[in-house]
Amino acid sequence: MEVQNVELHRVVATAIIHKGGKYLITKRSPEKKVWPGKWTVPGGGLEVNDYINTPTTVPTEKIWYYALENTLRREVEEEAGVQIGKIDYLLDLCFIRPDNVPVITLSFYAPWKSGEVKLNSESVDHAWITVREIKNYEFIEGISREIEMVDELLKGADPETVKFYG
């Protein structure tokens, strides 16, 4: 496997959205390059356009705070048509896409705030599911465990003991 520039990564943020003990999942379009037709959670990539044309956070420098959070909120609204509340960090992961692009994904969780689910063309279906219903869906590898982790955290588990494996 050859990666062009070992310092450059595509940066992606995902949101496990919870509401009343259920979690929003979406089914990827069969036309998607990566994991077509699999179930996942809303999210997407950070683009320079997400911040470059907005006012800088530090007036004397070209520095933008909250760029990833703003990207995540935009992606959730674009992909699922809903707004989310306070965003909490869950975990990070890295992988190499089939086209050899390295990706770092930052996984977050947040409560549903408002809106009815309205999917864009990136997804073909959605569901609000409980943890018990996870087994009924074919997820991208790891997403089901991430949902379980959020469920544990929301039920009061110690964050130090909630891990991806173990």
Image: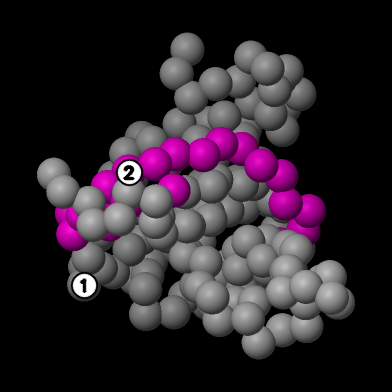
* Residue 106 position within the rendered picture, expressed as x and y whole percent measured from the top left: 54, 47
Mark 1 and mark 2: span between their CA atoms?
A: 20 Å
Say if 64 sits above or below 16 in the image. Answer: below
**Residue 95, numbered circle:** 2
* Residue 82 position within the rendered picture, expressed as x and y whole percent measured from the top left: 64, 70
Question: Across the whole image, how many numbered discs are drawn on residues?
Answer: 2
* Residue 110 position within the rendered picture, expressed as x and y whole percent measured from the top left: 69, 51
**Which residue does the image show at 44% across and 39% down from the upper left?**
93
In the rendered structure, the answer to whether residue 70 lies left or right of residue 49 reads right
- Is 53 inside the magenta-drawn segment? no
Q: What stretch is highlighted in magenta?
A: 84-104
Which is nearer the eye, 134 or 141?
A: 141
Which amino acid, by three-letter code, is at mark 2? Phe
**Which residue does the image show at 65% across and 87% down from the upper left?**
53
Residue 72 visible, this orientation: yes
**Which residue does the image show at 35% across and 60% down from the upper left?**
27
Which amino acid, by three-letter code, is at mark 1? Glu
